[in-house]
Image (cartoon, rainbow, N blue to C red):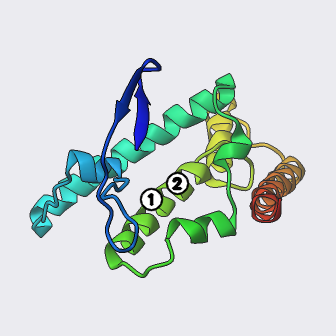
Amino acid sequence: MGLIRNGTDSLSLDLVTTEEGKIGVIARSPFALLGTERINYSLSEAIPAGFTEGWSLLNDQFKAFGQMFRGKIKAKDSLGGFGSIASMYGNQWIWERFWRMTAILSLILAFMNLLPIPALDGGHVMFLLYEMATGRKPSDKFMEYATMIGFILVLGLVLYANGLDFLRAFF
């Protein structure tokens, strides 16, 4: 067998194959090449480690949102609906992955819930801050319309995310 190295060197090699026709070369993941280590925590060690991991994940979410607003990340590439969520769990049942993904999704949903969109908790906080700053409560009619608009925004986002999943699956 011959090969060219660096565009100029030509090299000839004799290869020995197995009965299946394999030459003994296999692709490896970066984790296999770099090595991974499993750390088992006691309950008293797991709580601060989980807090640190969760805080790191939320920090990454803040950075990703900042990059989306600056146009460095396309929202459609980062958004996914129910199909994307299901595929994140994988097609093998592994308890550790299940609980890890459940924790990640819970943190992401908590972060999304705090966005200043009416109908979400972040929207209510926004109106409470307005009330604290002005000393006046927004009218009930305004709150009703704002909540409906927020609900339509959230529903639109859910439909858009699931529509992206549909397009990715079939096109």
User: Where, quadrant-wise, is the C terminus in this rendering?
Assistant: bottom right
Residue 138 place in picture, x, y as percent: 79, 43
The residue that disc 2 covers is 108
Q: On screen, 82 above or below 32?
A: below
The residue that disc 1 covers is 104
Q: Quadrant of residue 5?
A: top left
Residue 145 place in picture, x, y as percent: 89, 52
Residue found at x 68% / y 50%: 79
Q: Quadrant of residue 155?
A: bottom right
User: Where, quadrant-wise, is the N terminus in this rendering?
Assistant: top left
Q: Amino acid at mark 2?
A: Ile
Q: Nearer the viewer, residue 143 or 16?
A: 16
Asked whether, in this view, residue 99 is left or right of residue 46, the answer is right
Q: Separation of disc 1 and disc 2 at Cα? A: 6 Å
Q: Amino acid at mark 1?
A: Ile
Do the residues bearing badges 1 and 2 touch, measured as CB atoms within 8 Å?
yes
Residue found at x 73% / y 44%: 76
Does dot 1 land on a helix, a strand or a loop?
helix
Residue found at x 34% / y 53%: 28
Picture disc at residue 168: none
Residue found at x 37% / y 65%: 100
Asked whether, in this view, residue 101 is left or right of residue 73, the answer is left
Q: On screen, 88 above or below 150?
A: below
Q: Answer few, some or many: residues within 10 Å of disc 1's Cα (few below 14, many 20 plus, some between 14 and 19).
A: some
Q: Nearer the viewer, residue 124 or 81?
A: 81
Asked whether, in this view, residue 150 is left or right of residue 110, the answer is right
